[in-house]
Image (cartoon, coloured by chain):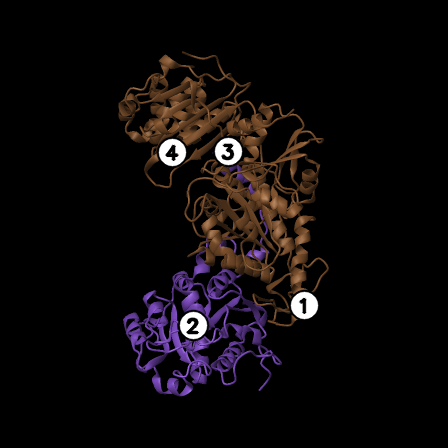
């Protein structure tokens, strides 16, 4: 039943929360990456601590992969509920692996006697190592590399835990003997040397590292999926990188703390999801009023209300755009790759600091929980400098200026007083109800929007022919599936415009929209929020909308199907 | 007497004639001068309401933010620059109502800041509705049959949470109030001063005369180290006791932060260590 070796493979692991899918994911990612493949993994999971039925999709290919796919070549089933949930993703040649003791007899299933082997290995904790050994042999991987990967994961071979896991891996490997290479991968050119290791990161780590690169030294947040990963990463770095980290009592406290920190000279971040952002919107408005820099990480999940807490959606674009009362400038960055998550997070700090405005980093569960390999992340040559001034005795926080940006002082640095007020205020920061001052202050604040649109903007990136007639427009995490689908389908005169900055829209977005005869907007929501924003800002709306809102990201296959439905004649 | 450098003469003060806020302004201003605080390192943080306008009338750094949100702002200012003296002040509706959750958790956190709450038992700026500290039966344009809620007892709550410093003062007692404010600012850790004041426009019950008749200093044998005694006295309603109910040395929030373990400098004096960050990146970057 063995099929010829394939150049790339998609694996699916289904199991309950607590069965160790994450460990298996990490082991397999490391193993396949060390063996020389590019790897990608995305998990979908239920909002519960134990039980339920979760899955991990893991891909390995000779080229970089960063998109979710539906069809899989091999599926490892760890719990009975997983089979009916996942079998829609099987093709005729999909190899199914599972333990008949827990699953019963399943036609065509390769038996992995996990219960029996676990018992022999010392308990269920060893199931991951057993499964790893078993899968490695089905995939035709190198045994030495397998052992090295498992040993380095569980600590050096001298420790008992590592030795026991290595033994478990061997049991798994041996049990797979009758089916060795049944799902074999074409060997990549060379295994990777440890020194050539790529970065294997998830989106949360990329955002956290980007924040640090952007000079973040303060984070106050309230835990909320899927935003919490960033908070945890920064908490782990608090000592090393000197970051003040506080779990606030609520999101209202979090955003007010962040504003307090910027006021005192910090570079503060808040990380939240839709419901938390709702609570922050008065603080967002305050940020606009007092002209404070601020970076908000808004990690989207499907709403309304609690919605699907652990799933993915791009449904909060309009919340980010319109949240907060009154009129004030803001920017929204929406990265779709790990590199961009890093760069946008770092740039958000520069942008917020320079424009004294809030910058919202809009991600989603899919991006944050996806792991793949990238060669490196680009660090700047020198650390960012906060744009603060040493104040003179006659300092005025809101002194008039051409571009709307007044020199920003902080308490304790200089002879001046730094007075900020959420009421309408004069140049000094004193409350005023003078109508002329009010008009001047509104104009001053709004002028800063031009900096965000032009000087500080992140331009879109165009993939495909410059003389396109059809244009697919997307933002954030739809990037990977659109690019991969376009590589698979012959769609003449079609280009993809990926927009890491969705507001204000950079001039290049407007130009591209005007050039297109057909505009297709892809977004992971039900009502086409990005298409609406494009129309509002440019007058050019979408001719076609590709929408998805069941809680899952777009798959490559879905985008391929959309492309094939288009009439390219 | 030499000119008080914290005074900001010529302000268009927004308070009603006879308002208790004038007395509090004078007492805060005199206390700042008496403590000889560095003007460049003194920050007042307030919310919204008539009380919250006080920083406008002083020569200090101020952050006049949102209704109810002074404490998180003040906490973060102190946590970002430990060299600053931070005072969060606002009214009873702001600190105990809208900001009630922050009040609880700020006490738990114990940052080194002073929390002055102007307590006039009524909402002024929104024109006379009940505040969290209004007594039962208090009739207002909104509570037309009188307040039916139990009044919030900030001192008892603070002592229950083992707050580091808990005091009540009455603006009519000038010297005593100054002494309490001075002790509160000097205390290392969170310090609550619940400062009774009349609202001459909207509270016809709790007037200057009422406060004079219904307040009394804590007994001379009161021990601020005795939490049980402090709690018992905080629960007494007649008379309302004035003075330092409770005081305790406790670990201070910002002194315990990992961010300062190796580097005492305020965050604005720091720069990212890019070499270190490259190492962190490699450490995180293996799945």
Q: Position of residue B178 (x, y in %)?
A: 46, 80
Residue drawn at x 41%, y 60% as measured from the top left:
B109
Quadrant of res A339: top right
Q: Which label sits on residue A554?
A: 3
Q: Position of residue A199 (x, y in %)?
A: 53, 33
Residue B46 in the figure: left or right of residue A501: left
| Distance (Cα) linking label 2 and label 1 | 36 Å
Look at the image and tell me in which quarter the N terminus of chain B lies. Answer: bottom right
Q: Categorize mark 2 by other alpha carbons within 10 Å: few (<14), some (14-19), many (20+).
A: many
- Subunit that carries the residue with mark 4: A
Q: Nearer the viewer, mark 3 or mark 1?
A: 3
Q: Name the tint of chain B in the rendering.
A: purple
* Nearer to the camera, A476 or A390: A476
SS category of the residue bearing label 2: helix
Q: Which chain is brown?
A: A
The residue where tag 1 is placed is A392
Q: Nearer the viewer, mark 4 or mark 1?
A: 4
Q: Categorize mark 3 by other alpha carbons within 10 Å: few (<14), some (14-19), many (20+).
A: many
Residue drawn at x 38%, y 20% as measured from the top left:
A96
Ranked by sequence position, the earlier of labels 4 and 1 is 4
Q: Nearer the viewer, mark 2 or mark 3?
A: 3
| Distance (Cα) linking label 4 and label 1 | 60 Å
SS category of the residue bearing label 3: loop
| Distance (Cα) linking label 3 and label 4 | 18 Å
Q: Categorize mark 4 by other alpha carbons within 10 Å: few (<14), some (14-19), many (20+).
A: many
Q: Which label sits on residue A54?
A: 4
Q: Position of residue B277 (x, y in %)?
A: 55, 43
The residue where tag 2 is placed is B92
Above or below — where is B184 with respect to A29? below
Above or below — where is B215 with respect to A222? below
Q: Position of residue A149 (x, y in %)?
A: 44, 26
* Nearer to the camera, A145 or A564: A564
């Amino acid at each position: 039943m063995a099929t010829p070796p394939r150049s790339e493979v998609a694996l699916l692991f289904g199991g309950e929360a607590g069965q160790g899918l994450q460990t298996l994911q990490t082991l397999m990612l490391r193993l396949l990456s060390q063996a020389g493949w590019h790897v990608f993994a995305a998990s979908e999971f239920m909002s519960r601590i134990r039980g339920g039925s979760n899955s991990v999709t893991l891909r390995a290919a000779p080229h970089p992969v960063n998109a979710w796919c539906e069809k899989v070549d091999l599926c490892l089933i760890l719990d009975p509920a997983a089979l009916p949930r996942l079998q829609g993703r099987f093709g005729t040649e999909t190899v199914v692996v599972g333990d008949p003791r827990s699953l019963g007899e399943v036609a065509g299933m390769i038996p992995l006697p996990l219960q029996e082997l676990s018992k022999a290995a010392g308990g269920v904790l060893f199931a991951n190592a057993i499964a790893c050994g078993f899968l490695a042999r089905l995939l035709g991987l190198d045994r030495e590399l397998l052992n090295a990967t498992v040993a380095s994961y569980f600590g050096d071979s001298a420790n008992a835990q590592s030795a026991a896991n290595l033994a478990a891996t061997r049991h798994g490997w041996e049990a797979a003997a009758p089916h060795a290479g049944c799902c074999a991968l074409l060997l990549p050119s060379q295994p990777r040397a440890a020194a050539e290791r790529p970065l294997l990161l998830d989106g949360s780590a990329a955002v956290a590292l980007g924040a640090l690169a952007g000079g973040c030294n303060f984070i106050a947040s309230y835990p909320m999926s899927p935003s919490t990963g960033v908070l945890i990463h920064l908490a782990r770095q608090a000592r090393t990188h000197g970051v003040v980290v506080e779990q606030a009592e609520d999101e209202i406290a979090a955003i007010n703390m962040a504003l307090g920190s910027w006021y005192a000279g910090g570079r503060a971040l808040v990380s939240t999801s839709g419901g938390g952002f709702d609570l922050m919107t008065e603080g967002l408005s305050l940020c606009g009023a007092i002209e404070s820099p601020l970076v908000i990480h808004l990690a989207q999940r499907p709403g309304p209300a609690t919605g699907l807490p652990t799933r993915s959606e791009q449904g909060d674009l309009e919340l980010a755009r319109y949240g907060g009362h009154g009129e004030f400038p803001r920017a929204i960055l929406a990265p779709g790759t790990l590199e961009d998550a890093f760069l946008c997070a770092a740039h958000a700090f520069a942008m917020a600091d320079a424009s004294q405005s809030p910058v919202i980093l809009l991600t989603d569960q899919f991006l944050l929980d996806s792991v793949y390999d990238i060669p490196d992340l680009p660090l700047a040559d020198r650390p960012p400098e906060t744009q603060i001034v040493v104040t003179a005795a006659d300092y005025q926080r809101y002194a008039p200026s051409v571009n709307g940006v007044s020199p920003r002082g902080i308490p304790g640095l200089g002879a001046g007083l730094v007075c900020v007020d959420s009421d309408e205020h004069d140049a000094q920061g004193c409350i005023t109800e003078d109508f002329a001052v009010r008009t001047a202050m509104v104009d001053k604040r709004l002028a800063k929007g031009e900096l965000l649109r032009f000087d500080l903007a992140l331009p879109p990136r165009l993939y495909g022919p410059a003389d396109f007639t059809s244009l697919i427009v997307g933002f954030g995490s739809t990037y990977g599936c659109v690019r991969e689908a376009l590589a698979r389908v012959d769609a003449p005169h079609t280009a993809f415009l990926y927009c890491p900055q969705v507001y204000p829209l950079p001039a290049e977005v407007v130009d591209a929209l005007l050039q297109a005869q057909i505009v297709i907007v892809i977004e992971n929501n039900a009502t086409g929020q990005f298409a609406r924003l494009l129309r509002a800002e440019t007058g050019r709306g979408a001719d076609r909308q590709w929408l998805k809102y069941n809680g899952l990201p777009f798959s490559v296959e879905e985008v391929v199907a959309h492309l094939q439905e288009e009439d390219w004649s | 007497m030499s000119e008080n450098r914290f005074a900001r003469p010529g302000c268009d003060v927004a308070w009603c004639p006879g308002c208790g806020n004038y007395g509090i302004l004078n007492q805060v201003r005199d206390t700042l001068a008496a403590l000889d605080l560095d003007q460049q390192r003194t920050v007042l943080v307030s919310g919204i309401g008539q009380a919250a306008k006080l920083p406008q009338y002083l020569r200090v750094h101020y952050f006049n933010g949102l209704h109810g949100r002074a404490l998180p702002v003040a906490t973060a200012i102190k946590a970002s620059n430990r060299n600053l003296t931070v005072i969060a002040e606002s009214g009873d509706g702001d600190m105990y109502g809208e900001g009630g959750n922050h009040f609880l958790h700020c006490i738990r956190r114990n940052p080194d800041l002073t929390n002055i709450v102007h307590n006039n038992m009524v909402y002024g700026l929104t024109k006379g509705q009940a505040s969290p500290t209004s007594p039962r039966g208090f009739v207002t344009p909104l509570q037309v049959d009188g307040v039916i809620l139990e009044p919030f007892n900030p001192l008892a709550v603070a002592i229950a949470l083992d707050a580091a410093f808990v005091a009540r003062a009455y603006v009519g007692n000038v010297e005593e109030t100054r002494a309490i404010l001075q002790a509160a600012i000097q205390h290392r850790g969170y310090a609550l001063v619940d400062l009774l004041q009349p609202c001459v426009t909207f509270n016809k019950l709790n007037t200057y005369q009422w406060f004079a008749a219904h307040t009394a200093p804590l007994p001379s044998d009161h021990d601020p180290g005795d939490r049980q005694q402090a709690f018992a006295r905080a629960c007494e309603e007649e008379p309302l006791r004035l003075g330092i109910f409770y005081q305790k040395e406790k670990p201070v929030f910002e002194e315990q932060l990992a961010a300062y373990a190796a580097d005492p400098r305020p965050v604005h004096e720091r720069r990212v260590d890019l070499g270190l960050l490259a190492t962190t990146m490699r450490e995180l970057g293996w799945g």
